[in-house]
Image (tube, coloured by chain):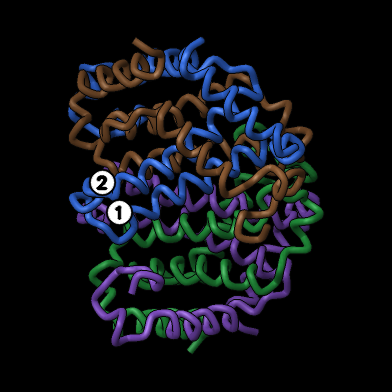
Chain colours: A green, B purple, C blue, D brown
Amino acid sequence: MNDIQILIDELVKFRDARNWDQFHNTKDLALALSIEAAELNELFLWKTTEESELVDQAKLKEELADVFAYALLLAGKHGLDVKEIVLEKIKKNGEKYPVEKSKGTAKKYNEL
Amino acid sequence: MNDIQILIDELVKFRDARNWDQFHNTKDLALALSIEAAELNELFLWKTTEESELVDQAKLKEELADVFAYALLLAGKHGLDVKEIVLEKIKKNGEKYPVEKSKGTAKKYNEL
Amino acid sequence: MNDIQILIDELVKFRDARNWDQFHNTKDLALALSIEAAELNELFLWKTTEESELVDQAKLKEELADVFAYALLLAGKHGLDVKEIVLEKIKKNGEKYPVEKSKGTAKKYNEL
Amino acid sequence: MNDIQILIDELVKFRDARNWDQFHNTKDLALALSIEAAELNELFLWKTTEESELVDQAKLKEELADVFAYALLLAGKHGLDVKEIVLEKIKKNGEKYPVEKSKGTAKKYNEL
């Protein structure tokens, strides 16, 4: 079994042992994800770009793990194959951001 | 090679082909992640919990893939092993939320 | 002097007494705002719509005040007249969402 | 009548003309606020701190107005006096961040 499925299974096991499935609806899982993303961002608040690179690794691990946890639970709930959806998105982005037009610029595709 | 590393490698390849490494500092990657998380949440805005379960799967795939993309790029940039950090976090959460105390309640650990 | 300006002045006074102007650049103020918005949302996480209406008023006041504080600091920093920009936005939204088309539906303007 | 109440009244009038009160529950208003905060942050994504100061003023006005709109609707829904809650929060923060300890540092109160 691949690592992504192992993680989803562990997260579901953790959830089910606590009867938390009742709270884990799609809308609240997405909300939880964005709250964890904000906690991740708080590590960099009022810090320069350079200071942010030196973020405390223990804190980064914890906050990033929380983000992954809710993203994986969402994928699991909807039977999505994480590898497949990310590879598909990369392909799609390759069409929106062709190398020759997007090289070295951070412009959005609709401004290229 | 495991699936998570395959995805990180593809994302880095995509980034480097466009010389986007210059923009992908830690602080902005985290910011990008939270913006994508907000776009994911927008799929559920003004929708009931029940309606949210019936979310358009194509849109869900795209928004969730964007979230994973930035989370994976962050993990890759800091050399973090996604499997390891998520398993560690599950273990830690198991201590914060022991089954007997947290079963069936959505209370935060500091209110249990 | 109007209430909005009084609040901006008080916030600036608080900031300047602590020499925090050096941290309060536009990008970080916006980031702070979104982190406070996430803390506000955390009050409703795992809660039903009905439960959310009964939110602890003391907590709601605190989190909403934080959101206003950063929004007001941003407006102050860029010399924006809050009353004017909100009234302008209402007018603009009136054109995007004409009553006859948008009555009773939560659809986005581009789906009306 | 003060400017803040004028804005709340205009927003409520706009909402009621469209029968949107049914969608504007507390949980979704808070979610809408955080989505607008993310759109505001998107103006600064991949931009340096310096570039962010030069943000397009028309876009800044629009995104900030959206943030204020939902914050004001939330305040209005819960009968909160914006002036009062912000002044109270400033007072509270003055206790958490005494000038002598917090001058010139961006540390959180629990690290001072």
Q: Amino acid at mark 2?
A: Lys
> Is any part of residue A109 visible from this angle?
yes
| Disc 1 versus disc 2: nearer the observer | 2
Q: In this image, C18 relative to A4: left or right? A: right
* Residue at position x 52%, y 28% in the image: D64
Q: Chain of mark 1?
A: B
Secondary structure state at the residue bearing disc 1: loop
The percent coordinates of residue B41 (x first, y second) are 40, 50
The percent coordinates of residue A2 (x first, y second) are 51, 85
Secondary structure state at the residue bearing disc 2: loop
Q: Which residue is mark 1?
A: B55
Q: Which residue is mark 2?
A: B47
* Residue at position x 42%, y 39% in the image: C64
Q: In this image, A89 relative to B98: left or right? A: right
Q: Chain of mark 2?
A: B
Q: Amino acid at mark 1?
A: Val
Whole-angstrom CA distance, mark 1 to mark 2, is 10 Å
The percent coordinates of residue D10 (x first, y second) are 31, 16
* Mark 1 touches mark 2? (CB < 8 Å): yes
Q: Which is more N-terminal, label 2 or label 1?
A: 2
Work out whether residue B15 or residue A57 is closer to the camera in this orientation and state it. A57
Work out whether residue C96 or residue D60 is closer to the camera in this orientation and state it. D60
